[in-house]
Image (tube, rainbow, N blue to C red):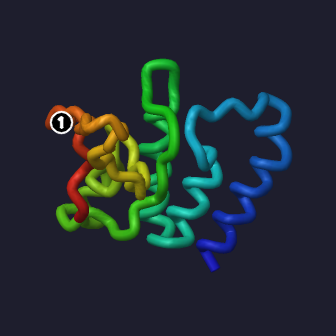
Amino acid sequence: MIRQAAHFAIRGYQLTLSSLIGRQCRHWPSCSTYTDAAIQRHGLWAGGWIGFSRICRCGPFGTHGIDLVPEAVPPQATWVTPWRYGRWRGVEAPRSPFVCEEFDTGDGQTLTPAPRPASAAPPASR
C-alpha cells in the first residue's frame, strides 16, 4: 500500500512538474523512473535511499549514461545506516555481451585487441 502511494506520487510528478521543468535527466532510465523501480523492488525505505542517491548523482558534475536499479541491496546496509543503501558514485551499467577477440586480416596477420587497463574493467559482480 505504501509502495503504491509512492508510485502514484512519482507518477504525478512525471505527468505534471517534470513536463513543466523539462525532461533533462542525464541517465537512462530517468531519475524518477529509477526511484519508482527501486521503491517497487526494495521497499520505501531502502528504495527511497537508493533513489535519493541517484538524484544526488544526477547533476552537472555527476554521473550519466545507463544506470540500472541494483538487484539486491548492499549487504552492509541496515535500516539504521540508510546511506549505505545508495550508490553515491558511479553507475550500475549492464555488462556488455561483446568480447574483443583476435582477428585474422586474411594476409597472414592477426590483430589482437589491446589489453584493457585495470581502471576500465567492469565492476565485479556482487
Of residues 36 and 120, the one drawn nearer to the viewer in this rendering: 120
Q: Is residue 119 visible?
A: no
x and y percentages locating residue 88 in the rendered image = 33, 40
Of residues 96 and 78, the one drawn nearer to the viewer in this rendering: 96
Give the quadrant of the C terminus. bottom left
Whether residue 2 sits left or right of residue 87 in the image: it is: right
Q: Which residue type carries mark 1?
A: Pro
Whether residue 64 sits left or right of residue 7 in the image: it is: left
x and y percentages locating residue 80 in the rendered image = 25, 61
x and y percentages locating residue 118 in the rendered image = 15, 37
Residue appearing at x 51%, y 38% in the figure: 65
Q: Is residue 17 visible?
A: yes
The residue that mark 1 highlights is: 115
Residue appearing at x 53%, y 65% in the figure: 39
Residue appearing at x 42%, y 49% in the figure: 93
Of residues 122 and 9, the one drawn nearer to the viewer in this rendering: 122
Q: Secondary structure at mark 1?
A: loop
Placement of 103 over or under 2, stated as above or below: above
Whether residue 106 sits left or right of residue 37 in the image: it is: left
Whether residue 86 sits left or right of residue 40 in the image: it is: left
